[in-house]
Image: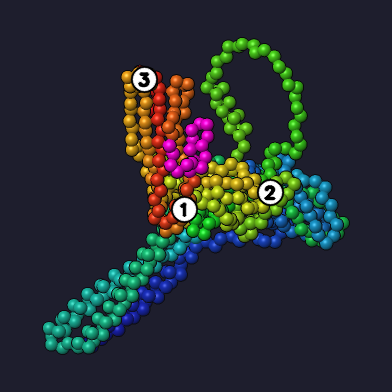
């Protein structure tokens, strides 16, 4: 038994050495590359007359076809400072749109602005570099986990092999008649606890490695999506300045970029129980300008800078005879004509809420209350602008000759301090989606009428209950056709409803054809010269209502009449 105890003591010593080696090996694995932190402070270039300014985007004004970016930064000027440099700006800046404003403790004179271009390889682009650093960090974490896994695997093999040797020795001592079962139990308990701990560690490593692998694949996919095929252009802007003494200066730089746009989208909910319409205005904002807008203040403008700042000039209006000319249109001509028509078509504008409306001389601006991040990936971001409830009247319209259905109709006035711009509207009854439609430009205060689909709780049926044809008789010269239609309405709801029913009488287009003996019950609310009939009815809960339409068409014997 002394040999078993000695063997167990050696095992504990060896286990300690294996664990110590594992700790040393684990510490040798990199914990991942540290990402570079961009300095917040202004950095001076090698040329002391130029000061590189660190700036961030404070506000973006989004127009229907472009955006104006406003950056702010700070710099310390000295008498020898000749320029403030903003580096790494997107290559999509529209020429002539750069504006600079400055304020500070001492007077400084801005004497000009210079714009220069440079081309960066893909690996130099900030967004590419950031993802590559993340990939490197994840790969480092995965290497560390794999190192831990290798150590645990070695420990498990060692414990299993030592356990086998201990088992053989214990068996020999048992056969020799000198066993110590308490020592065996002690060893088995220790071995089991260690193996269980190792198994848990390996399971944790497998789970962590799977998560890191998924993250790595997502990063590589994103890198592939944003990686340009070749080099990409960026612009540097140098603000030329003069300063008589050393002082701090706050600089505001603005420029226009494209492509960027916003378009309106509306959600209109019918709330018949409360007699209201809930109108929610939102904006679809997207941009692919080459720089992300991170946590910026957004202002959505209806102005169109591309329309110019002054009206055009009329040309003479001449009249003459057309001179015939043979022309043959080619596919290229047609394509160019199509492009020209598309270019002339004005893109739809947009609206939205959680915003404050500001009316300007040139249009309406919506200042969004919270900051937003809009990536330069062309993806659409839906931004809430406004949500209002307004009183509405609800009734039903049915044209049973076409469809035996009753459609819920709402009429309401647009009680908003701004117009509704052209855009898509999604229609709901409470939480149920019923369809979409396109809205035209609607001024504030306009009346709007919308349909919210059929209501199966208000029934309508139209049937021909009589059709009788009679001849002219012995001395007569005309034939007659008598028709009787019955329209049945039923309100299955627990509240009264108002229903407008539309139907018609035939109208003769020939003096030899007559419509006579017309009997309509109840009398229609209106009837026009085209034979159109309208009833406006109120149905109480569970009430039925019938409409009878009885008329006779008389025409010369032997004639074939279209329409009956």
Q: Is residue 530 magenta?
A: yes
Quarter of the image where the N terminus is located? bottom left
* Label ID, residue 364: 2
Q: Position of residue 300 (x, y in %)?
A: 65, 50
Quarter of the image where the C terminus is located? top left
Label 2, label 3: how far apart the Cα atoms are = 74 Å
Q: Residue at x 80, y 54 (%)?
A: 81
Of labels 2 and 3, earlier in sequence is 2
Whether residue 17 is visible: yes
Q: Which of 177/36 is in front?
A: 36
Q: Which of 444/408 is in front?
A: 408
Q: Secondary structure at mark 3?
A: loop
Of labels 2 and 1, earlier in sequence is 2
The quadrant in which residue 130 appears is: bottom right
Q: Which residues are magenta?
A: 519-535
Circle 2/circle 3 CB separation < 8 Å = no
Label 3, label 1: how far apart the Cα atoms are = 49 Å
Q: Residue at x 38, y 38 (%)?
A: 485
Q: Which of 290/97 is in front?
A: 97
Sort mark 1 into few (<14), some (14-19) or many (20+) by Cα contacts within 10 Å: some
Give the answer, above or below, for where 197 lies relative to 516.
below
Residue at mark 1: 497
Q: Position of residue 353 (x, y in %)?
A: 60, 55
Q: Secondary structure at mark 1?
A: strand
Mark nearest the camera among 2 and 1 is 1
* Label ID, residue 476: 3
Sort mark 2 into few (<14), some (14-19) or many (20+) by Cα contacts within 10 Å: some
Give the answer, above or below, for where 380 lies relative to 554.
below
Q: Is residue 180 magenta?
A: no
Label 2, label 1: how far apart the Cα atoms are = 40 Å
Q: Position of residue 413 (x, y in %)?
A: 60, 50
């Amino acid at each position: 038994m002394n040999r078993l105890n000695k063997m167990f003591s050696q095992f504990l010593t060896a286990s300690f050495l294996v664990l110590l080696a594992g700790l040393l090996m684990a510490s040798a694995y990199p914990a991942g590359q540290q990402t570079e932190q961009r300095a917040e402070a202004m950095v001076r270039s090698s040329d002391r007359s130029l000061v590189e300014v660190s700036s961030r985007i404070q506000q973006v004004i989004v127009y229907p076809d472009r955006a104006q970016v406003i950056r702010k930064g700070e710099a310390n000027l000295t008498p020898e400072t000749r320029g403030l440099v903003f580096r790494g700006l997107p290559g999509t800046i529209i020429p002539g749109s750069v504006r600079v404003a400055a304020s500070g403790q001492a007077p400084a004179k801005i004497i000009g602005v210079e714009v220069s271009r440079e081309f960066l390889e893909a690996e130099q682009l900030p967004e590419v570099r950031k993802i590559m650093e993340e990939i490197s960090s994840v790969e480092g974490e995965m290497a560390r986990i794999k190192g831990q896994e290798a150590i645990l695997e070695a420990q498990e093999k060692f414990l299993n092999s030592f356990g086998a040797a201990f088992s053989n020795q214990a068996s020999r001592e048992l056969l020799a008649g000198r066993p110590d079962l308490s020592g065996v139990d002690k060893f088995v308990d220790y071995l089991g606890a260690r193996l269980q701990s190792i198994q848990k560690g390996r399971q944790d490593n497998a789970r962590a490695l799977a998560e890191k692998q998924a993250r790595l694949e997502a990063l590589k996919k994103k890198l592939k999506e944003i990686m340009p095929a070749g080099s990409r252009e960026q612009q540097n802007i140098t603000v030329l300045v003069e300063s008589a003494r050393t002082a701090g200066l706050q600089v505001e730089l603005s420029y226009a970029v494209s492509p960027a746009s916003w378009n309106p989208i509306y959600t209109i909910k019918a709330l018949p129980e409360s007699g209201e319409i809930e109108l929610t205005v939102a904006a679809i904002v997207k941009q692919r300008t080459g720089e992300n807008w991170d946590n910026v203040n957004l202002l959505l403008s209806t102005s169109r800078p591309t329309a110019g700042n002054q009206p055009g000039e009329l040309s003479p209006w001449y009249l003459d005879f057309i001179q015939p000319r043979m022309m043959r249109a080619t596919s290229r001509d047609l394509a160019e004509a199509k492009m020209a028509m598309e270019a002339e078509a004005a893109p739809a504008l947009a609206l939205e809420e959680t915003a404050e409306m500001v009316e300007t001389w040139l249009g309406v601006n919506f200042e969004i209350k919270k900051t937003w991040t809009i990536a330069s990936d062309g993806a659409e971001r839906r931004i809430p602008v406004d949500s209002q409830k307004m009183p509405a009247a609800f009734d039903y319209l049915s044209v049973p000759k076409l469809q035996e259905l009753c459609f819920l109709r709402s009429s309401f006035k647009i009680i908003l301090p701004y117009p509704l711009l052209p855009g898509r509207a999604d229609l709901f009854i409470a939480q149920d989606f019923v369809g979409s439609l396109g809205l035209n430009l609607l001024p504030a205060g306009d009346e709007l009428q919308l349909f919210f689909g059929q209501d199966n709780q208000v029934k309508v049926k139209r049937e021909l209950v009589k059709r009788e044809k009679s001849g002219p008789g012995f001395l007569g010269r005309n034939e007659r056709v008598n028709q009787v239609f019955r329209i049945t309405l039923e309100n299955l709801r627990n509240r009264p409803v108002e229903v407008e029913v539309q139907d018609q009488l035939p109208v003769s287009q020939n003096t030899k054809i007559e419509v006579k003996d017309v009997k309509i019950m109840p009398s229609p609310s209106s009837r026009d010269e085209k034979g159109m009939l309208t009833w406006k009815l109120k149905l109480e809960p569970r009430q039925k209502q019938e409409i009878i339409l009885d008329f006779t068409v008389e025409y010369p014997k032997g004639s074939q009449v279209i329409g009956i």
